[in-house]
Image (cartoon, rainbow, N blue to C red):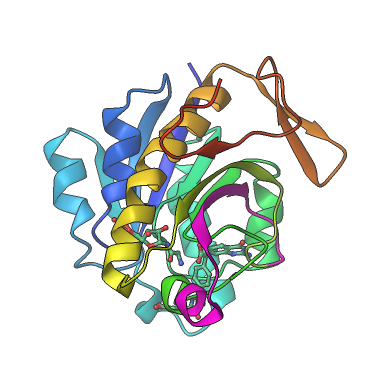
């Protein structure tokens, strides 16, 4: 069975969705850059190893990333899942794990990379918003896309209501991506495009509430 380590910074609901889905991956550890992350006690309660690598204890991103890599390598995972992980990673860290780091981002990339995506989507007046699972490359939130889910922006929406609608889709598509990886169905077409074998479409998609093939 392929193995994985999950990186979190906070509440860890995506981590929980990944673990509870039992996608066929051996989740060996959960690592947080914040000691107070709510997801840590939950992971420990499920018998998963937990570690903290506190970015505040490091003078530079390089030094934090070196400590993070050491913590990750102790578990020798096949994949790294960023699940609400809030630290930008250095190029050196990313090149250590080629085509192995996944992220769930709360927008329909390439729209709205970075932070505050729900507020920015509402300010831009988009009618569809959503979430994207992508491979992590040094270009922030611009790596090859594995799966996306779209949700409508509704009249009278608030940032919180929209965020909750997107989060429900995050909890579907991140485990879906994990199942595809576990089954060895994820293929690269060149450096930038990812395809899921046997899904019948170029790349993959999910429009709520329909399930992908
Ligand atoms: N690292 C690289 N190199 N490439 C990506 O695509 C990455 C990444 C690290 C994290 C997640 C991403 C998201 O889904 C992610 C993708 C944090 C920030 C950020 O600005 C931006 C994007 C993402 C994660 N972080 C601030 C920093 O200085 C700290 C913000 C905070 O602590 O609240 O690192 O959105
Ligand atoms: C999720 O919406 C995730 O997509 C987003 O933060 C939330 C974390 O929730 N990630 C980012 O914004 C990364 N910068 P969770 O801790 O409950 O999974």
Residue 132 seen anywhere in this rendered image of the structure: yes
Span shown in magenta: 120-139
Residue 49: percent from left, percent from top: 26, 40
Residue 159: percent from left, percent from top: 33, 73
Q: Is residue 108 above or below residue 175?
A: below
Looking at this view, is 42 or 155 the one in front? 155
At x 70% / y 44%, what residue is drawn?
Answer: 98
At x 23% / y 63%, what residue is drawn?
Answer: 37
Question: In the drawing, does residue 107 fall left or right of residue 54?
Answer: right
In the rendered view of the protein, which quadrant contains the C terminus? Answer: top right
Q: Is residue 98 above or below residue 38?
A: above
Q: Quadrant of residue 42?
A: top left
- In the rendered image, the residue lying farthest to the front is 155
- All told, the count of numbered labels is 0
Please state the quadrant of the image where ligand 2 appears: bottom left
Q: Is residue 205 above or below residue 84?
A: above
At x 79% / y 41%, what residue is drawn?
Answer: 193
Residue 9 seen anywhere in this rendered image of the structure: no
Can residue 12 be found in the magenta stretch?
Answer: no
Residue 115: percent from left, percent from top: 48, 75
Q: Quadrant of residue 163?
A: bottom left
Question: In the drawing, does residue 187 fall left or right of residue 9?
Answer: right
Residue 166: percent from left, percent from top: 39, 54
Can residue 133 be found in the magenta stretch?
Answer: yes
Looking at this view, is 109 or 61 the one in front? 109
At x 36% / y 33%, what residue is drawn?
Answer: 28
């Amino acid at each position: 069975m392929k193995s994985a380590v999950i990186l979190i910074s906070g509440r860890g609901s995506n981590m929980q969705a990944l673990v509870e889905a039992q996608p066929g991956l051996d989740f060996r550890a959960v690592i947080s850059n914040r000691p107070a992350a709510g997801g840590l006690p939950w992971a420990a309660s499920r018998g998963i190893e937990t570690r903290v690598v506190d970015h505040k204890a490091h003078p530079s991103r390089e030094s934090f990333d070196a400590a993070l890599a050491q913590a990750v390598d102790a578990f020798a995972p096949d994949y790294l899942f960023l699940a609400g992980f809030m630290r930008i990673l250095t190029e050196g860290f990313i090149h250590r794990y080629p085509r192995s780091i996944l992220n769930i981002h709360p927008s329909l990339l390439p729209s709205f990379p970075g932070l505050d995506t729900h507020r920015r989507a509402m300010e831009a007046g988009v009618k569809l918003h959503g979430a994207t699972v992508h491979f992590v490359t040094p270009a922030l939130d611009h790596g090859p896309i594995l799966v996306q889910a779209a949700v409508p922006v509704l009249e009278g929406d608030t940032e919180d209501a929209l965020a909750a609608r997107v989060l429900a889709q995050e909890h579907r598509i991140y485990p879906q991506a994990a199942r595809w990886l576990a089954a060895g169905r994820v293929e690269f077409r060149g450096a930038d495009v990812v395809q899921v074998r046997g899904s019948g479409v170029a790349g993959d998609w999910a429009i709520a509430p329909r399930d992908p093939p």
